[in-house]
Amino acid sequence: MTHPSPSLEATHSPPVFSLMIAPAQVMRGHQALAQAAEAIARLGQRPLVVGGDRTLALVKPFLQPVLESRSLQAAQASYGADCSEASLANLKDAITHHQADCIIGVGGGKALDAAKLLAYQAGLPIATVPTSGATCAAWTALSNVYSDQGAFLYDVALPHCPNLLVLDYDLVQTAPQRTLVAGIGDALAKWYEASVSSGHSERTLIIGAVQQARVLRDILLQKSVAALRSPGSEVWRDVVDATVLMAGVIGGLGGAQCRTVAAHAVHNGLTHLLESHGTLHGEKVAYGILVQLRLEEMVQGNRLAATARQQLLKFYGEIGLPQTLDDLGLRDVRLSDLQRAATLACSPSSDIHRLPFEVTPTQLIAAMVSTTAPTTETPSDYADLRSMQSSRSEVEG
């Protein structure tokens, strides 16, 4: 009897997918960091604590007693302003100088992205300690890399989620409320992007991720207003869990195709405009959701998208998320700069191409300047930009 050769069997085998779904351990609760000493000590004895200058100072009273309780020899290193290649090079020098055997990332999205990527490049275990509810970066196996000027360049898929995540509600409560509002916007995008890119999938885990994204949206729409009125309360903790933890689950379970579509593509394009750097990641993503829904209306004539946009506009008004370019500080942006951002958002490698229709920079600009428009337009309205151009003061001249 003859048997197929191993190489022939391998040629016809289905592809193997590797999912980085969750951190190895998640600790959450009031004073969670104070109780994390043993878990941190299992990672190493000489941690390098990575964060921004202000965050490192803020976290020290929380973290120092934890490290001292286990006689851990820690050093601190600032990632600077962005998770950039230059910043990572400096952090690698800090690892060498301190002879670090593990990383503790503290802060918001960019700090945690820098810490995670640094740990991966150095082959060290990592604990993430989010200091706000602004993103799910503490959970995910992904890091975004920016230029030294804060423009998004590329992302790096990491081989695993963090070894330890410590969500300390007392620490998160010290952050400005605006950060949690931004996190709500970022987390909302999970539904609007996953449902478009993967809503028709028949694969079990992707179905699970999409349905979790729907539940996440419902939690945020139902609980956010009450949570923002009562920081530290049970409903506030529910929303923090949603933005930091549950949003990360969805990206891990569904993979890249569930993670980002047009809303994040718009964010990435806007980061190339210096005028947008005063706004947070989640604020730009929240605006990007409105742009995505507007594209679905204008290009597809999708009335459900129109209804969803109007519902979100009301919700955004209630909690303070940006609805327009003006709200993002881009009232006086030049048309050429807006075209540059739209072109970058529509680049061949952009996640915007996970939409079920083609999008051009011209269409995208039309959607970007009409996020609050009434829902009476026809699908062909995007074609004529001349009236839009004449009504905006940023046309060069």
Image (cartoon, rainbow, N blue to C red):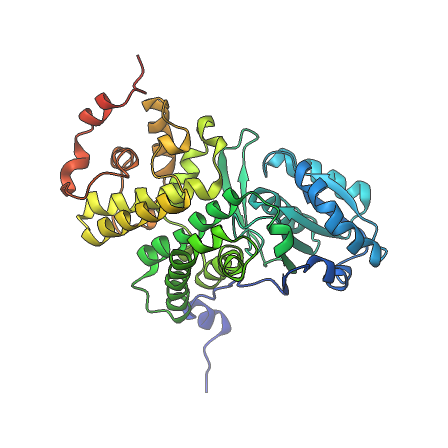
Q: Nearer the viewer, residue 203 or 289?
A: 289
Q: Where is residue 329 in the image (x, y as percent from the top left)?
A: 41, 29
Q: Where is residue 380 in the image (x, y as percent from the top left)?
A: 14, 39
Residue sitting at x 26%, y 47%: 310
> How many numbered discs, if any?
0
Q: Nearer the viewer, residue 247 or 19?
A: 247
Q: Is residue 292 visible?
A: yes
Residue sitting at x 50%, y 73%: 6
Q: Is 255 situated left or right of 390 in this image? A: right
Residue sitting at x 58%, y 36%: 82
Q: In which quarter of the image is residue 346?
A: top left
In the displayed image of the protein, which residue is found farthest to the top? Answer: 397
Q: In which quarter of the image is residue 216?
A: bottom left
In the displayed image of the protein, which residue is found farthest to the front? Answer: 230
Q: Where is residue 302 in the image (x, y as percent from the top left)?
A: 19, 51
Rendered-image quadrant of the C terminus: top left
Q: Is 292 situated left or right of 31 in this image? A: left
Image: 35 above or below 182: below
Q: Is 328 situated left or right of 389 in this image? A: right
Q: Which of 45 and 256 is in front in this view?
A: 45
In the displayed image of the protein, which residue is found farthest to the right? Answer: 71
Image: 90 above or below 198: above
Q: Is residue 351 visible?
A: no
Residue sitting at x 48%, y 55%: 227
